[in-house]
Image (cartoon, rainbow, N blue to C red):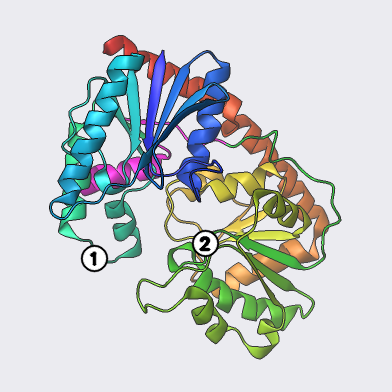
Amino acid sequence: MHLAFLTSEYPHPRTGRAAGIGTSIKNLVTELVKRGAQISIFIYGQKEDAVFTEGGIKLHLIKHQKYRLFGWYLHRRFLQNYLNKYIAIDKIDALEAPDWTGITAFMKLRCALIIRFHGSDSYFCKLENRPQKKKNFWFEKTALEGADHLLSVSKFTAEETRKIFKLKKEIEVIPNSVDVHRFLPQHLKVQPGTILYFGSLIRKKGVLELSEIFNRIVEENSSARLKLAGRDVQDINSGRFTKELMQEVFTPAAAEKVEWLGVLTYEKILEEIARAKVVVLPSFAEALPMTWIEAMAMEKALVTSDIGWAKEVMVNGETGFIVDPKDHKTYSEKVLTLIKDPVLAERMGKAARVRILEKFSTEVVVEKNLIFYESVVRRR
């Protein structure tokens, strides 16, 4: 069985920055290769054209194309022709693409096309209650209607996407996975009172609420510290950078206790997670967040948001707490509870890893994917 993946991101030194989608693809394909599958990855929007094999995976770097007019259509036609060439040469059975931007709209591929819901622009616009460009909705709807099979990383995302696009097709739900051999509990000395947020500094991740929450925490516990690791993003509403907006909200007392770590390597992120007393991830818009399952795999008790997908990942009161990020009082109280009660925090952290091992480890999730892909190929 030869499977291919079309993506704009993938973790590799030659491909630039990769976020959750790229990480989830790499986790999956690394394990699929071990199970005997042939894998090709087509990464578009790159700085160079290149084809090479690494770790049993054939990587295609596809250079970004520029067009004077109708780029949205000509780019897709270019990718279609490139893909069909290698579908024929390498005898690819099925190709998977993400729902974001409807990259496969108008494509006619010579193999089965699977679209996995990691969260479309339409989906995130609905969750964030913001307007969407009509052409983006059209691209995504056209791509989904043209797919042979639909997958989603969470039940919540599947149902929301079905409603947005009025989809009639069956949607299989298979979650993202985490490499539990890389994201391990690390026996580093925990820094008392340290609260960690990691991920992009962006409104939809709830970081503006986190400023208000931390103000309350410092009022109750002056030794608490907040560390923020991630890329500062320009705010979609104000046009200003999110860090600047957060700084305006912090009280002077809280501001003194904040440490801005910026963008860190994976190794440094692992170290920061290990040293944190509590991990806070108050996001408003996700499909199924990699940051949550990575921190849980490292035996960290979390305080997260309570929206949609949350109950598919967390068990409230067992692996941590799920709270409405706009309820600053309750959210701060739950963080303080974990800071004050190390026994509870440790117990929740251990329960979190057990849940990851049972539900979200790559070894468990790859079996579900294999069954799905084999059924796609048989039907084809």
Q: Does 242 sit left or right of 81 as displayed?
A: right
Q: Nearer the viewer, residue 19 or 348?
A: 19
Q: What residue is drawn where x is 39% and y is 31%?
A: 5
* Amino acid, disc 1: Pro
Instruction: Identify the residue at horizontal 48%, vertical 16% (top origin).
Output: 37
Residue at (22, 37) in percent of width and height: 78
Q: Does the magenta-highlighted stretch encompass residue 210?
A: no
Asked if the residue at tag 1 contacts the one at tag 2, i.e. Cβ–Cβ closer than 8 Å, the answer is no
Residue at 56 percent across and 82 percent down: it is 247
Residue 164 in the magenta stretch? The answer is yes
Q: How many residues crowd mark 2 within 10 Å: few (<14), some (14–19), many (20+)?
A: some
Which of the pair 94/334 is nearer the observer?
94
Dot 2 amino acid type: Ser
- When asked about the image quadrant of residue 41, the answer is top left
Q: Secondary structure at mark 2?
A: loop
Residue identified by numbered label 2: 200
Instruction: From this view, report whether residue 307 is shown above or below residue 232.
Output: above
Magenta residue span:
152-177
x%, y% of residue 17?
A: 50, 51
Q: Using the rendered image of the protein, determine whether residue 207 is visible from the camera's viewpoint.
A: yes
Does residue 276 appear to the left or right of 24 in the view shown? Answer: right
Q: Quadrant of the N terminus?
A: top left
- Circle 1 sits on which residue? 131
Q: CA distance from mark 2 to mark 1?
A: 21 Å
The local crowd at label 1, few if under 14, some if 14 to 19, many if 20 or more residues have their Cα within 10 Å, is: few
